[in-house]
Image (cartoon, rainbow, N blue to C red):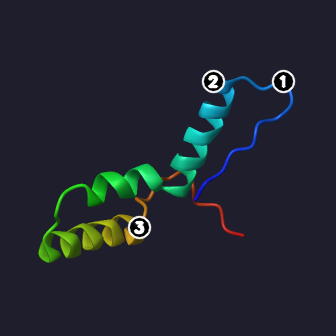
């Protein structure tokens, strides 16, 4: 559970902004959106595979980045 304590002289709007940033950082909103609807196991696996491919794809060769060491 996320908690935000008010700082001295902080307005409610500032506290809400900090709370929203904490929620984004923790991935809470993304998880809530993902679990709002049922996701078939095959779709879940497909999503995980696509994410893994994005992470492990080799970066394209660019002639300017040939520095070694």
Judging depth in this view, the residue of 24 and 12 nearest the camera is 12
Residue positioned 25% across, 55% down in the render: 36
Occupied quadrant, residue 65: bottom right
Q: Nearer the viewer, mark 2 or mark 3?
A: 2
Whole-percent x, y for residue 46 in the image: 19, 71
Q: Is residue 38 above or below residue 24?
A: below
Q: In the structure shown, which secondary structural element does the residue marked by tag 3 occupy?
A: helix
Query: Tag 1 or tag 3, which sits nearer the N-term?
Result: 1
- Residue contact at pointers 2 and 3, CB within 8 angstroms: no
Q: Nearer the viewer, residue 57 or 5?
A: 5
Q: Which quadrant is the N terminus positioned in?
A: bottom right
**Of 47 and 59, which appears nearest the observer?**
47
Q: Quadrant of residue 60?
A: bottom left
Label annotation for residue 13: 2
Mark 3 or 1, which is nearer the eye?
A: 1
Question: Could you say where residue 61 lies in the image, as x and y percent from the top left?
Answer: 44, 59
Q: Disc 3 designates what residue?
A: 55
Residues packed near mark 2 inside 10 Å, few (<14), some (14 to 19) or many (20 plus): few
Tell me what residue is drawn at x 24 percent, y 67 percent.
47
| Residue 48 on image: x %, y % | 29, 72
Residue drawn 60% across the image and 47% down it: 22
Circle 1 is placed at which residue position?
9
Q: Is residue 25 left or right of residue 5?
A: left
In which quadrant is the C terminus drawn?
Answer: bottom right
Closer to the camera in the image, 54 or 66: 54
Q: Gap in Å between the C-alphas at discs 2 and 3?
A: 36 Å
- The relative height of residue 46 versus residue 25 in the rendered view (above or below) is below
């Amino acid at each position: 559970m996320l908690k935000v304590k008010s700082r001295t002289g902080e307005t409610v709007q500032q506290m809400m902004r900090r709370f929203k940033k904490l929620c984004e950082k923790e991935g809470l909103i993304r998880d809530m959106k993902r679990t709002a609807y049922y996701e078939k196991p095959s779709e879940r696996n497909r999503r995980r595979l696509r994410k893994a491919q994005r992470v492990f794809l080799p970066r394209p060769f660019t002639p300017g980045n040939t520095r070694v060491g």
